[in-house]
Image (tube, rainbow, N blue to C red):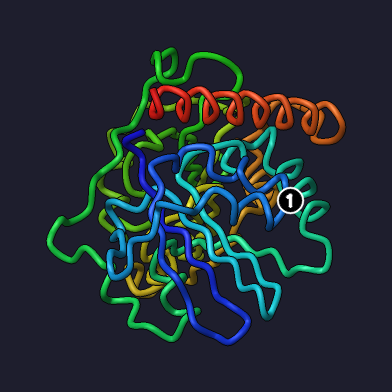
């Protein structure tokens, strides 16, 4: 698999071990069977000293066995989907009884910070921002009820949608306002996005959220001088209430969603098993 993630295990004595997996997409599904199952995946994956940076790390897990803390993040997978995120967290918490379970919005940098290591080590300072194109209504990237995307609402009457395959638009800072001037309008967006921004130009205030990790997420206020920036983390419902131009279709976040996530996890286990057989053959 080409998608990469670091997995860190902190032993009871405080020492840590670094591993690297090529199964980052869907990494959240590996957590559904609890800590023992995660540890069983690691033999042969040891990568001491090889930390994936903000560009290469598409996911990450830290398992602190002494403190019983589980940290994780992902760019893709059911935990980054509006329909399934709550179900994923409910299933993980049930499988990790007695553990603190926490999502990392700043990805690999937060993994290192937890260990007392320098977060700058994994920063990509040379690549610049990757600007997300704005999508027109009917764009093929918005096909189906769960296309993802970043909903950007402005005041009470403007709604735009950007691709989610690039940096979160909030990290563009105030220059985003210039790009919005020519962005296609969407009226009221009723599909299931996985990130968003609500801008109130009159009060120079914005709120933003994301279901996927965003390197340098906590730097957003510095990029909007003179604005009040509220990070809503994964609380997409605040966006719904703020502008009323983002109104995703209702969905079952309970048993139906859990069943779908468990089915996806079973498919992933089967794919892993088939991959092991091919590797031994």
In the image, residue 171 above or below residue 194: below
207 or 42, nearer to the observer: 42
189 or 57, nearer to the observer: 57
Residue at the far right: name it: 255
Answer with left or right where residue 250 lies relative to residue 10: right
- Secondary structure under tag 1 reads helix
Residue at the far left: name it: 126
Quadrant in the picture for residue 79: top right
261 or 185, nearer to the observer: 261
Name the residue rendered at 54%, 65% in the picture: 62
* Residue annotated with mark 1: 92
* Residue 117 image position (x, y, % from top left): 37, 83
In the image, residue 107 above or below residue 138: below
Quadrant in the picture for residue 221: bottom left
Quadrant in the picture for residue 184: top left
Answer with left or right where residue 88 lies relative to residue 254: left
* Residue 241 image position (x, y, % from top left): 71, 48
- Tell me the quadrant of the picture where the C terminus can be found: top left
In the image, residue 9 above or below residue 114: above
Name the residue rendered at 67%, 33% in the picture: 247
Name the residue rendered at 61%, 44% in the picture: 30
* Residue 71 image position (x, y, % from top left): 59, 64
Name the residue rendered at 41%, 20% in the picture: 141
């Amino acid at each position: 698999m080409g998608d990469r993630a670091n997995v860190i295990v902190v032993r009871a004595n405080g020492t840590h071990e670094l591993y690297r997996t090529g199964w980052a997409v869907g990494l959240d599904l590996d957590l559904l069977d609890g800590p023992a199952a995660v540890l069983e995946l690691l033999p042969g994956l040891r990568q001491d000293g090889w930390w994936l940076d903000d560009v290469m790390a598409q996911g990450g897990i830290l398992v602190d066995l002494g403190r019983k803390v589980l940290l994780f993040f992902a760019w893709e997978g059911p935990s980054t989907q509006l329909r399934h995120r709550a179900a994923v967290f409910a299933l993980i918490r049930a499988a990790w009884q007695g553990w603190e379970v926490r999502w990392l919005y700043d990805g690999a940098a937060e993994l290192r910070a937890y260990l007392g290591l320098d977060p700058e080590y994994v920063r990509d300072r040379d690549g610049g921002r990757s600007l997300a194109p704005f999508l027109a209504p009917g764009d093929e990237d918005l096909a189906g009820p769960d296309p993802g995307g970043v909903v950007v609402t402005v005041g009470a009457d403007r709604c735009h949608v950007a691709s989610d395959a690039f940096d979160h638009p909030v990290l563009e800072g105030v220059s985003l306002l210039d790009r919005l001037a020519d962005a296609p309008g969407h009226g009221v967006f009723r599909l299931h996005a996985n990130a968003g921004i609500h801008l109130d130009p009159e009060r120079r205030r914005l709120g933003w959220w994301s279901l996927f990790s965003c390197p340098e997420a906590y730097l957003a206020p510095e990029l909007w001088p003179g604005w009040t920036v509220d990070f809503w983390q994964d609380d997409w419902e605040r966006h719904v209430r703020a502008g009323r131009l983002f109104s995703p279709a209702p969905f079952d976040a309970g048993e139906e969603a859990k069943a779908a996530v468990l089915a996806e996890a079973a498919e992933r286990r089967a794919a892993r098993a088939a991959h092991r057989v091919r590797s031994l053959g």
